[in-house]
């Protein structure tokens, strides 16, 4: 399973990349607005730090303009994945950009039917938003399970399932059990994966017992 981080904050991306756990980055217009940096510069900087796919989202809503924007974003670096919304126009842009060899991440996927269309359009990634479905009392991970099951029936579908809108470790574990290819995590959600109170407690106890020996390894 690959881990992307869902942020445009370069300091966070740099710090988390040093853990060796970051396989890519996803951004969206809201995250770019939060970062407060010029969009194209921010994407170029992220692509310099991260070797894996970096999703950069178009902001047009008609296919021809999305394609033009996508080409401009893809020209920033070889590892840009152009992000398009799961609309009719977005899928037309996905098909055109994918046919040109550009990685495309189809975002805002909220149904299995939409995910089938994304695969047919040649998407590199499809992003089901689990947290936002859970927020409505719906079953976000159930959608991920459906998509994984459906894609497994069709080996000619090459689209990777990228679980987005992740809220915490349980989403990651459940998505991994379902065989999802990628999860994208906000920085703090990635940090949560490292943590367990029994790890902290056990380490504290080992270190205090070690201190009584008066020894040192180095
Ligand atoms: O970047 C797409 C997605 O991960 C956004 O998640 O937390 O805004 O629902 P969220």
Image: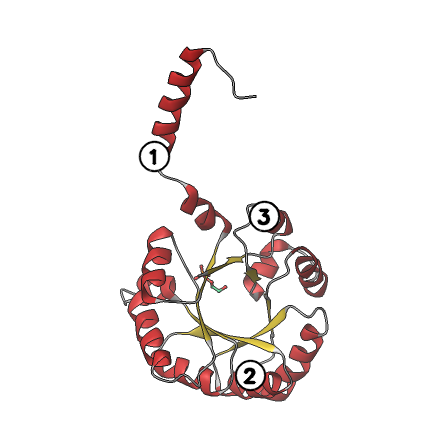
- The N terminus sits in image quarter: bottom left
Question: Where is mark 1, residue-wise?
Answer: 197
Is the residue 157 above or below the residue 198 in the image?
Answer: below
Q: Looking at the image, which residue is at 70% across and 68% down?
A: 77
Which mark's residue is nearer the viewer, 1 or 3? 1
Q: Which of 184/29 is in front?
A: 184
Q: Which of 59/27 is in front?
A: 27
Mark closest to the chain's N terminus, 1 or 2: 2
Q: Looking at the image, which residue is at 53% across and 87% down?
A: 89
Q: Looking at the image, which residue is at 54% across and 88% down?
A: 92
Question: Where is mark 2, residue-wise?
Answer: 94
Q: Circle 3 sits in a helix, a strand or a loop, which is it?
A: helix
State the image coordinates of residue 68 (x, y, percent, origin top left): 68, 83
State the image coordinates of residue 182 (x, y, percent, origin top left): 45, 64
- The C terminus sits in image quarter: top right
Q: Are marks 3 and 2 in contact (CB under 8 Å)?
A: no
């Amino acid at each position: 399973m690959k881990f992307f981080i869902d942020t445009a904050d370069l300091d966070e991306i740099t710090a988390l990349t040093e853990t060796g756990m970051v396989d890519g980055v996803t951004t969206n217009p809201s995250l770019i607005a939060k970062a407060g940096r010029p969009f194209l510069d921010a994407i170029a900087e992220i692509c310099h730090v991260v070797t894996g796919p970096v999703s950069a989202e178009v902001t047009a809503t008609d296919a021809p303009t999305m394609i033009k924007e996508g080409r401009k974003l893809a020209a920033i670096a070889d590892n840009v994945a152009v992000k398009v919304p799961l609309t009719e126009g977005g899928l037309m842009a996905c098909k055109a950009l994918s046919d040109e060899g550009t990685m495309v991440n189809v975002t805002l996927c909220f149904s299995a039917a939409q995910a089938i269309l994304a695969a047919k359009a040649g998407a590199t990634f499809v992003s089901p938003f689990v947290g936002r479905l859970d927020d409505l009392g719906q079953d976000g991970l159930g959608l991920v399970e459906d998509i994984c099951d459906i894609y497994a029936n069709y080996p000619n579908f090459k689209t990777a399932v990228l679980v987005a809108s992740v809220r915490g470790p349980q989403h990651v574990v459940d998505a991994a059990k379902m065989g999802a290819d990628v999860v994208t995590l906000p920085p703090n959600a990635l940090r949560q994966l490292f943590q367990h109170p029994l790890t902290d407690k056990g380490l504290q106890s080992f270190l205090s017992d070690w201190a009584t020996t008066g020894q040192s390894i180095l």
